[in-house]
Amino acid sequence: MAQQPIAGGPMRVIGRRGPNIDAVERVTGRAKYTGDIDLPGMLVAKVMRSPHAHARIARIDTARAEALPGVRAVITHRDAPKVMIWGHRQYALNDRVRFKGEAVAAVAAVDVDTAERAVTLIDVQYEPLPFVLDPEEALKPGAPQLFEDGNLEGPPRMLTRGDVEQGLRESDKVIERVYHCPTMWSGGMEPRASVAQWEGDRLTLWASTQSPFRVHGSLAAMFNIPDSNVRIIASYIGGGFGTKSAPHTDEALAALLARRARLPVKLQYSREEEILDSNTRFETRMYVRIGVKQDMSLHALDVKAYINQGAYHTRLGGLGNQATHLYRTPHVRTEQLRVHTNVPNTGPTRGVGDPQETFGIESAIDEIAIEMGWDPLAFRLKNIKRTGDPIARGGSGTEDGRLVTQVLDRCIEDGASRIQWSRRNAVAGSVPGAKARGIGVACTERGGGGGLGGASVKVNLDGSAMVFYSSTDIGTGSRTTLAMIAAETLGMPLTMFRSVSGDTEIAPYDGGSQGNRTLQGTGRAVEAAARECLKQILESARPLLDNAAPDDLEMQDSVIRVKSQPARSVKLAEVMQRRGRSAVGIGNTVMPQTGIEVERTSAAHFVEVEVDRETGKVRILRYVAAHDVGRPVNVTIVENQIEGGTIQGLALTQGEEMRFDGRTGACLTGSFIDLKPPTMLDFDPRLIEAVIVPNEGSVGPYGAKGLGENPCHPGMAAVANAIYNAIGVRLREVPFTRAVILRALSGARPANSATV
Amino acid sequence: MAQQPIAGGPMRVIGRRGPNIDAVERVTGRAKYTGDIDLPGMLVAKVMRSPHAHARIARIDTARAEALPGVRAVITHRDAPKVMIWGHRQYALNDRVRFKGEAVAAVAAVDVDTAERAVTLIDVQYEPLPFVLDPEEALKPGAPQLFEDGNLEGPPRMLTRGDVEQGLRESDKVIERVYHCPTMWSGGMEPRASVAQWEGDRLTLWASTQSPFRVHGSLAAMFNIPDSNVRIIASYIGGGFGTKSAPHTDEALAALLARRARLPVKLQYSREEEILDSNTRFETRMYVRIGVKQDMSLHALDVKAYINQGAYHTRLGGLGNQATHLYRTPHVRTEQLRVHTNVPNTGPTRGVGDPQETFGIESAIDEIAIEMGWDPLAFRLKNIKRTGDPIARGGSGTEDGRLVTQVLDRCIEDGASRIQWSRRNAVAGSVPGAKARGIGVACTERGGGGGLGGASVKVNLDGSAMVFYSSTDIGTGSRTTLAMIAAETLGMPLTMFRSVSGDTEIAPYDGGSQGNRTLQGTGRAVEAAARECLKQILESARPLLDNAAPDDLEMQDSVIRVKSQPARSVKLAEVMQRRGRSAVGIGNTVMPQTGIEVERTSAAHFVEVEVDRETGKVRILRYVAAHDVGRPVNVTIVENQIEGGTIQGLALTQGEEMRFDGRTGACLTGSFIDLKPPTMLDFDPRLIEAVIVPNEGSVGPYGAKGLGENPCHPGMAAVANAIYNAIGVRLREVPFTRAVILRALSGARPANSATV
């Protein structure tokens, strides 16, 4: 893909630093989240959840609950339309439950107490079934089956080139390892919330979703009503991280209850429900074989991954093939087995499977380099894919594309220089004493910006302007960055803009806020919409400027000038007043697919840790995150995204593991106390150095690339590699808690790990 | 203007009969009017009103009101921004009151009782001023002055051609008459209502308005906030008739109170407030001199009109120059004096000044024809303007344009045939007995469709579709007719459409619902938006149809066909699913101004009355309303509009007069009991025959013309002429109550009438 030409000379808005334009609303509490919605007569909903990990519902009697004064609606699987929730293998309510905590019934009542009491009055007779929690166990003969067609979700996803067995035979050195990441919590601070209101056969649903149009399509199908009769509004979102990127049970339950009760219904999950019944990060067990030649070339890579999808799973998921996208390797095979078990729903969460996969691949790369006596950085630099290298255009299949404008080498070099890579221990674990320091690295990459982008831009009569998009700002700053793109394109100050997000009735169809796509995919649509607006404005300005040719007009700082006679100018507000109506442009875009060219965005993370051999505590001393972001639209937001994503990646090293009771299937980590998400005291963002590696070669608007996912990928691998460098202990299971470190230091062999 | 070419062969949707697409919502009570809006924490507002017709506010003390528990905000003129309400000469609250009932202060409280009690606790000290109620009195030396620059609003509006004095001298016969219409109520069944909600410096206002974007601009200016920060939502409106076409005090008061209270505020007028403080129909006194030649030609016409604008007045108003647009006349002068007096606000109401003017002109035409012994119909047919005749392009100035596609002659001929004109009394009042029948006629005309049209059309993934427009459906059926235009253009069934109206955030700028413009002006925008949608859809269909040329594709009944191979087709829903996103088109249009050509729309109304000489009762026996509507979009709606407008015109003959107490300025008709608006028992719509006179030559969408105003124009004149024909008594003052008829029959001379 050709480098995006930058129109209009130097940037005036893009590339600056600055706060989010909605910062004041957010920090003053004025921003309205779905939980803040209050409608007249609104009922409160509560969900009854299964006490069994796997069971048939033999009988369900709601008579006592319905008789309770103040109860307005009770629904069970009998009331759920037999239309599956978007991308899931489940209805809103099912006659068979597949994880402990699955919704069995729901109640809408005049207040919380009544709703909660009503839930206890529903009589359910379960027929418990055997259950399975481990994905490998679930594939064994005789394992409990969750679905009639078995526990495997579709055929294995394969990506192959060369002959991996032959490659491994040809290699001078092969190691074989197993890496494991458990099911991990990834939700936002805001638990799921839905408010449903029916007016006749028209549904308005306020939802905490990243993808209003997916919820829109899902509910229209479920209720068999025209798309025109569904409106989804998702204004402020308290974090999504992918868990809110697909339609979920809660939206359907709120809508079903509201229809039954003929009153608006709010369903807001408790923290426990949010942990238990969200689309959380899936467990991944990777069997990795890696072979190298003496010339330091990576020769063969074989990955077999078991993905524990849990009971149900959105159709968005799997590993992103970091294994094959990062390094030139003649012989590759990756195989992904997506397996249903009786743990709760999983789904895409920040990076989808890439943090897990990066942990395996970047650990294995480290391991074999060290076994060979090579500098792991030199080994990477020799083997990373660079501009022009072959790459698979899809997530699987063969390497049919060619990589463009890759700057991973510069990310590595810049990061290494800042962390002072040469300070690392030449021999891992060789420094004596209670506290040992070590440095580690991990690389990653990803695509982005895909799907259909849609937005509109309006310039009002007073010269103020608005950006409308149906995706949501889940904390990524898209309200701000999209307005900056419009401001740059139009030639107006950012202060003139307001962004309205997340309303399917106001804004055009857009693919939603996920997968590194909003800035790049929606941003292109904003740019197109703003260009259309500008065209209309310049046309309206012509009569005020001697009918100058449109090409001879430009707008800067809301003043329209004749380029060939710069003294001739008119203010935007004057043009708009005479025009008499707002200028509106719609942008509908797709990411261009130019032949075989593939654009990816990459990063290298470096971390220095201090491991306390006596307590097992791992302290982050310094962290350098060097990223290709294309052209940064707002430097402050880019840095915040890198910092936030990095911390989320690091969090996975220390907690957020979801643990289940093998005897009952119960989740043992249903609260923040058990789940131990890190706080600012655990990871000081000031220790993180966000590095923007210049690369203007992007198909995104003004060369921008998306950055939502990547910062979360490398943390686990970089820290594992740094711990190894500090104390000489290789950790192949996440998280790296004190207990794990101490056990490893004592010489106990971690479960599941293997060496050839 | 060239006749609009009708694309795509015979019409499939347009021209049919059918109910309004929102009929079920309206009649089941599901339709949400502004008064139905209920927001959490919402306060109720009440207005304190002046007991004086004219006074200065010397002192105003709100302390006792503010101290009342439950009161959340009290505002007076001190709190009103010094920015006038759109088009008015008043602030939201003023330190001087100019009519009895003008708002002096407003209160927001937790309930109605508290708000009403608080109003009584506001202490106001007035300095009463002399007042004047009659517009001619108000222009005399020494009259009380309402404004510093006097009582005359701007210079007189003049339209002249030839030399009217010379023309009168040249005439073979001249008569001189005075016609009078009082201030008349014209409101809808729904009193004004506003709900204001602030979020920070952003205002959302639900309003009962015909012109959301006028309210939008007015409030943005008043609060000095960007246009982007104001959203007006006007969904269902219970009648507007022009009184809601301009911003009014109530919207500003609700917004001011809500800002002060930091809570949402609803202000809903009582019936009395709605009668008293609306923009009602202005009193008009017309001095008419008319001269004819023996050859039956109209030779000179002189009109001097005093328009009683009341205390304040929107800038929309005056007479439409029926006097000069209807008839060829070599010598014409019209002069309009717009005068402020201490009666309540007036404004444009159905037909603006044209019903009043038509009463004067069409009575005078009748009078002179009869004086000359001519058939008034033959006299009209000889003198009416026809296609190609000169006409003034603007409302005043010279006759610089040329009339196109005029079918008034056919309206007259068709109507005369249906009413059986030859049955009329050859000699007026010549039939003896208690009950006398008579037949009368009156003609009228008007422009329409002007201003800026804006709309958008969306076709969803399932093939359902939506029409968005920021104007409102005030009962005219625009939700239906605009959807029909989109359905016709796209080639889809009407049942697939939903219309969303009245939201400034969702829909593009549009001129609003008034002045015969929605169907024609907004309709053109809908047609343009639908064409853009169709283009996108056909483009998306091409890959499914052998990449047929776009010109070779067409959609009918939601199936896209290859015109050259009709067997090749694909369903719309299939195309949309593959397209993956909705198709959205925006239409921004202006009515074309093609040189000097002027399009008007005309009508002739015929009525047969029976006058009871003993009781004075006038019964309508039959009414024929023959209208040029261009091409009818929905025949049922056209007929309903003609019937509704006709009844509203007839209502003015029997009641709805606003009377004022000359000693105090108080309105004596503040309730329906005093105001006597007619009911279905007074005018049976089955007696009205709505006649659609074919005329497809319109610049409107598919040749349609607007019809909101005209049906209301001729009623007063036609009935006055019919009464004369029945009993030989000429009535020159509205209304024609029983008392007036009996007094006239007794020989008493009506006030203000004069003969040469």
Image (cartoon, coloured by chain):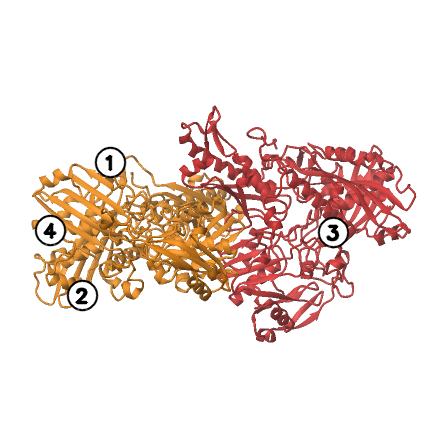
Chain colours: A orange, B red
Provide the secondary structure element on which disc 3 rests. loop
Q: Which residue does the image show at 78% across and 63% down from the upper left? A: B662
Q: Which residue is mark 1?
A: A400
Q: Which residue is mark 2?
A: A617
Q: Which residue is mark 3?
A: B679
Ranked by sequence position, the earlier of labels 4 and 2 is 2
**Mark 4 and mark 3, same subunit?**
no
Question: Can residue A603 be seen in this snapshot?
Answer: no
Ranked by sequence position, the earlier of labels 4 and 1 is 1
Mark 1 to mark 2: distance in Å? 46 Å
Residue B430 is drawn in which quadrant?
top right
Residue A115 vs residue B18: left or right? left
Q: Which residue does the image show at 59% across and 42% down from the upper left? A: B480
Provide the secondary structure element on which disc 4 rests. loop
Question: Can residue A721 be seen in this snapshot?
Answer: yes
Badge nearest the viewer, 3 or 1: 3
**Contact, mark 4 vs mark 1 (Cβ under 8 Å):** no
Front-lying residue, B138 or A246: A246
